[in-house]
Image (cartoon, grey):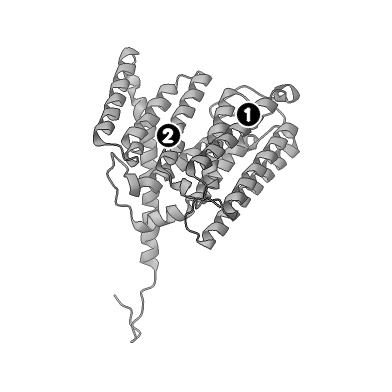
Amino acid sequence: MQPTTQKTTFLSLLATITALTAVIWLTANGLQTRFDVVNEKYYSFFYPWQTRNPTTMAYVTAWLGYALHNIAAWAIIWAAQRAKPKYESGFRWFNWAMVAVNLGGFALHWIQTQLWYDGLAISVPEVTSQGSVILMLVFILILEAPRRGLFFGKKINFRQAFLDVVRRYHGYLFSWALIYTFWYHPMENTFGHLAGFLYMFALLSQSVLLFNRAHLNKWWKFSLEALVLVHGTLVAIYQGNGLWPMFFFGFSAMIVLTQMHGLGLSARLRALLAGVFVLGVGLFYGLSGDFARINEVIRIPFIEYLAVFLFYGLFMTGYGLKRLLKPAPFSDKGEAKG
C-alpha cells in the first residue's frame, strides 16, 4: 500500500471539517424558534446563547457528552504514547480511533443541541472557554520555542525537563482545551459560531494526526496557529464591539515576533513583513485620530509572553523544591553525601 501523501491528508481533513461545519449551518435554523434563547449579553462574559430556563437533561447531557468525548481522546493519546510508535505517513489504529472519537463527539453534541440546546455555557462563564484556547496558544509558544525561538528567532534556554514535560503532555492539554470549548457552545449557525466551529475542527484535526508526519508540517502548524488572527478579527467585526484592531494587530504581532521565524523565510523577507506590520500599525492608528489606542497592539503579545514565563517560573519553583526536598543519597558508610 502506498503511503498517504501529506497533500492528500490535508485535503481530506479540510473537506471533513468543511462538511461538518456545513451540517451545523444547514440544521440549526429552527433552534431559535424551538428554544427560549436569551440572546442578550447581560454582563461581561455572560454567554447569550443559552436558554432562559435550562432543563436538568441539558445539564446532564452537556457534561456527560463532554466527559465521554474528552476521556476517550485522552485514552487514545495515552495508548498511542505507550506504544512508542515512530512518525509515519500512513494512518494507524490510533489515528482512525481519534477520527472515530471526534466524529462521535460531533454526533453526540449535534443530537444534544437539537434536543436540549444548552452546552456547558449554562454551568460555567464564557471566560473559561476563551481562557482554555489562550492557554493552548501559550503552550504552543513553549512547544515550538526550541525550533523557532520566542523573540525574532532568538532561542530561550528553557530547562530541558520543562520542555520534556510540555512535549509529553501537550496533547492532553490541547485536547481538553478544544473539546471543552467545543461542548461549551450549542451548535448554532451564527457567523461567529460557524467560524469558531470551523477553526475548532481544524485544530482538532491535529489530534487526529498524532504520530503522523503531517502533524509536524511547519506550514500546517503555522496555519493552525495563525488562523486565530482571522477568526478573532472576523468575529470581533461581526459583534461590532470595536475590538477588532486589538485582535488583528495583536495576533499579527505574534506572527512578526515569533511565528514566522520557524518557516525558513529569508532575513530580507522577514524584515519586509515586519516593516509592513509597523507601517500598517502607524497608518491605522495615525489616520484613525485615536493614536492613544495603539496600546491595543501589545495586549495579546504581552499576555501570551507573560504567561509563558509565568508557567516556566511555576515549573522551576516546583522543580527546585522537589530537588531541595529530595533526600540526599547515602554512602556505603551510611553518611549522607553532601
- Above or below, 278 against 138 in this view is above
Pointer 1 and pointer 2: residues touching (CB < 8 Å)? no
The quarter holding residue 255 reads top left
Identity, as a three-letter code, of the amino acid under mark 1: Ala
- Please give the name of the residue rendered at 73% of the width and 26% of the height, measured from the top-left corner: 35
Query: Which residue is at the far front?
Result: 1
Give the labeled residue for mark 2.
226
Task: Indicate which disc, 1 or 2, sits on the residue closer to the N terminus.
Answer: 1
Identity, as a three-letter code, of the amino acid under mark 2: Ala
Q: Is residue 89 left or right of residue 35?
A: left
Any part of residue 202 in sight: yes
- Please give the name of the residue rendered at 26% of the width and 26% of the height, measured from the top-left corner: 275
- Please give the name of the residue rendered at 39% of the width and 36% of the height, measured from the top-left corner: 303
Q: Is residue 234 left or right of residue 336?
A: right
Q: Is residue 276 left or right of residue 186?
A: left
Foreground: 156 or 15? 15
Give the labeled residue for mark 1.
22
Q: Residues within 10 Å of mark 1 (few under 14, many from 20)?
A: some
In percent of width and height, residue 178 lies at: 55, 41
Q: Residues within 10 Å of mark 2 (few under 14, many from 20)?
A: some
Q: Is residue 159 left or right of residue 190?
A: left
- Above or below, 141 against 268 in this view is below
Quadrant into which the C terminus falls: bottom left
